[in-house]
Image: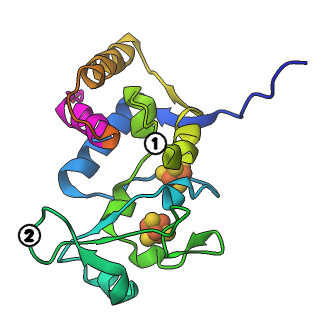
Amino acid sequence: MPAHRAETLAAGDFATWLGSIGQALRDGTDSAVPCGACTACCSAGMFIHVGPDEAAARAAIPADLLVPAPGLPDGHSVMGHDRDGRCPMLVDGSCSIYDHRPQACRTYDCRVFTATGVVDADPARAGVMERASRWRFDYADAAAREQQASLLAAAATGQEPNPLGRALTAIAMSKTRG
Ligand code: SF4
Ligand code: SF4
């Protein structure tokens, strides 16, 4: 009997997406990820950065959940997770502070792994990687496919030890078409 194949997910037009994620990285514009009911990245054992100017998020998150961010100037914080890797703001399967969630959550987009071919082998990230493996981009032309090929090559030779950082660096360095 053939193995069950997970349903694929429409990731949108590749070149358009690359332009949008590039902008999100440059100026913090929210990423419009069609997450549906997925909350995999909210239970992936991540420390969520909260900047000093994020007043709404700071007001929404209990103060005792915010600790100084290692290696960053005073005022920068991170929010940890429980033993199972879940963000404490994830309540009954959804974000309890969605309208006031931190910038890091607003810009997070698991399609960066799909686009760059970077794999995060941390078991805590298995849900995110499963989701990333199901996205399928559309390519308007051969140039878009070449654009992704160079992104894959850049990510494959990236030196950054953190997988998310490696994917984002490759994207930040890639040229989008005007
Ligand atoms: S893992 Fe991806 S699809 Fe799931 S909630 Fe996070 S960004 Fe959305
Ligand atoms: S603050 Fe909300 S969106 Fe961000 S990780 Fe926690 S539950 Fe997810």
**Which secondary structure, mark 2?**
loop
Is residue 171 highlighted in magenta? yes
Q: Answer few, some or many: residues within 10 Å of disc 1's Cα (few below 14, many 20 plus, some between 14 and 19).
A: few
- Residue at image location 29% in from the left, 41% down from the top: 162
Residue at the spot x=25%, y=58% of the render? 28
Q: Are marks 1 and 2 in contact (CB under 8 Å)?
A: no
Viewer-side residue, 109 vs 16: 109
Q: Is 172 on the left-hand or right-hand side of 5?
A: left
Q: Does residue 115 lie above or below 37 as drawn?
A: above
Q: Amino acid at mark 2?
A: Pro
Q: Is residue 162 left or right of residue 87?
A: left
Tell me, what colour scheme is on the image?
A: rainbow
| Percent of width and height locating residue 66 | 31, 79
The label on residue 122 is 1
Helix, strand or loop at label 1? It is loop
Amino acid residing under circle 1: Asp
Residue 99 at x, y percent in the picture: 44, 76
Q: Could you tell me if residue 34 is visible in this image? A: no
Please identify the quarter of the rendering in which residue 168 is found. top left
User: Which residue is at 22% across, 36% downward?
Assistant: 169
Task: Tell me if residue 145 is in the magenta stretch.
Answer: no
- Which mark, by number, is residue 73? 2
Q: Position of residue 90 (x, y in %)?
A: 54, 72
Please provide percent x and percent y for residue 23: 24, 47
- Tell me which segment is drawn in magenta: 165-177
Using the image, determine if residue 59 lies above or below residue 177.
below
Q: Nearer the viewer, residue 64 or 29?
A: 64
Q: Residues within 10 Å of mark 2 (few under 14, many from 20)?
A: few
Q: CA distance from mark 1 to mark 2?
A: 28 Å
State the count of labels.
2
Judge depth for marks 1 and 2 and give the one in front: 1
